[in-house]
Every structure is written in structure tokens, then in C-alpha cells.
Image (spheres, rainbow, N blue to C red):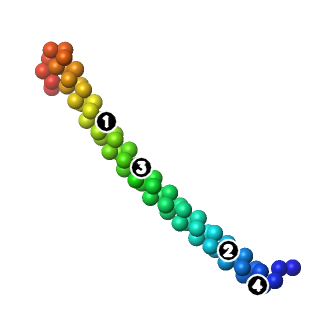
Amino acid sequence: MTSPAELERKVRQLDNDVQSIYEMLATIEATQKRQGNRLAEIATSQAEHGAKLDAILELLRGRQPE
């Protein structure tokens, strides 16, 4: 049979484990937000580059870019 002191120790350890998990989840969430922001920046930059390349192609084809 488990003594009250042993049971209390197990409860404290479980509480500590749960708190550690929440801290890890918060860290993961912050990392994913930063990565999402960076992906949005890259997508915007890629779209701008696409527009510039389209204009260059128009010039090479002998037409004025729109």
C-alpha cells in the first residue's frame, strides 16, 4: 500500500511534469508563430520577384511592361 507521503510525492511530480509540458507547448507555439511569419514574408517576396520577372520577360520579348 502506498503511504500518504509517497502519494503526495507522486502528485507533486505529476504536477511538475504537467507544468513542464505546458512550458514546452508554449515554446513550440512561439516557434511556430515565428516560422509562420517568416513563411508569409517569403511568400510576399516571392510574389514580388515573380512580378519583376514577368516585367523582365515582357522587355525581352520587345514589349513594354504593363
Residue at (42, 54) in percent of width and height: 33
Task: Measuring from the top left, give residue 49's x and y in whole percent.
Answer: 26, 33
Task: Measuring from the top left, give residue 11's x and y in whole percent.
Answer: 70, 77
Secondary element at image label 4? helix
Mark before the other along the chain sequence, 1 or 3? 3
Residue hosting label 3: 35
Task: Measuring from the top left, give residue 38's x and y in whole percent.
Answer: 37, 47
Residue projecting furthest to the bottom: 4
Residue 62: which quarter of the image? Answer: top left
Residue hosting label 2: 13
Residue 52: which quarter of the image? Answer: top left
Mark before the other along the chain sequence, 3 or 2? 2
State the separation of the CA atoms marked 1 and 3.
Answer: 16 Å
| Horizontal side of residue 35 vs 24, given as left or right | left
Residue projecting furthest to the top: 62
Secondary element at image label 2? helix
